[in-house]
Image (spheres, rainbow, N blue to C red):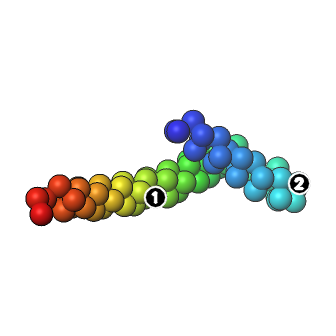
Amino acid sequence: MRLKIRQRAEGVVKRFEEMLPAEVAAQVDREHFDELTLLVEAAIGDIYATAMHEVAKEMEALAAKYRKQERILMEEL
């Protein structure tokens, strides 16, 4: 997944670089674009981690609900 996040970040920065006027892009050092890539990668990674954490919490809640329903259905009448 880390590679996909890196590729997405590189794509965002490449598109940003393409949007800049040529004279402006020429004035920006490659190092600055690399730093921007790291920042975008970190932001995407944070969003991904947050989303996966929320999914995990939802799955845990669903599993708890399932266990509760199973206990109720298995009780003797």
- In the displayed structure, does residue 24 sit left or right of residue 44? right
Q: Nearer the viewer, residue 49 or 24?
A: 49
Numbered label attached to residue 63: none
Q: Residue at x 58, y 44 (%)?
A: 5
Foreground pick, 58 / 51: 58
Question: What residue do we see at 53% from left, 39% from top?
Answer: 1
Horizontal and vertical percent for residue 7?
Answer: 65, 41
Total residue callouts: 2
Few, some or many residues within 10 Å of mark 1 (<14, 14–19, 20+) = few
Q: Position of residue 20 (x, y in %)?
A: 82, 59
Which residue corresponds to mark 2? 22
Q: Residue at x 17, y 55 (%)?
A: 74
| Residue 8, horizontal then vertical, whole percent | 65, 46
Q: Residue furthest front?
A: 77
Q: Is residue 8 left or right of residue 51?
A: right
In primary-sequence order, the first of circles 2 and 1 is 2
Q: Position of residue 66 (x, y in %)?
A: 28, 57
Q: Which residue is mark 1?
A: 51
Instruction: State which quadrant residue 4 falls in.
Output: top right
Asked which secondary structure carries label 1, the reply is helix
Residue type beneath disc 2: Ala
Mark 2 crowd level (few <14, some 14–19, many ≥20, 10 Å Cα): few
Q: Mark 1 is on which residue type?
A: Ala
Instruction: Give the spatial CA distance, label 2 vs label 1.
Output: 37 Å
Instruction: Kindly state the secondary structure of the residue where label 2 is placed.
Output: helix
Residue lying furthest top: 3
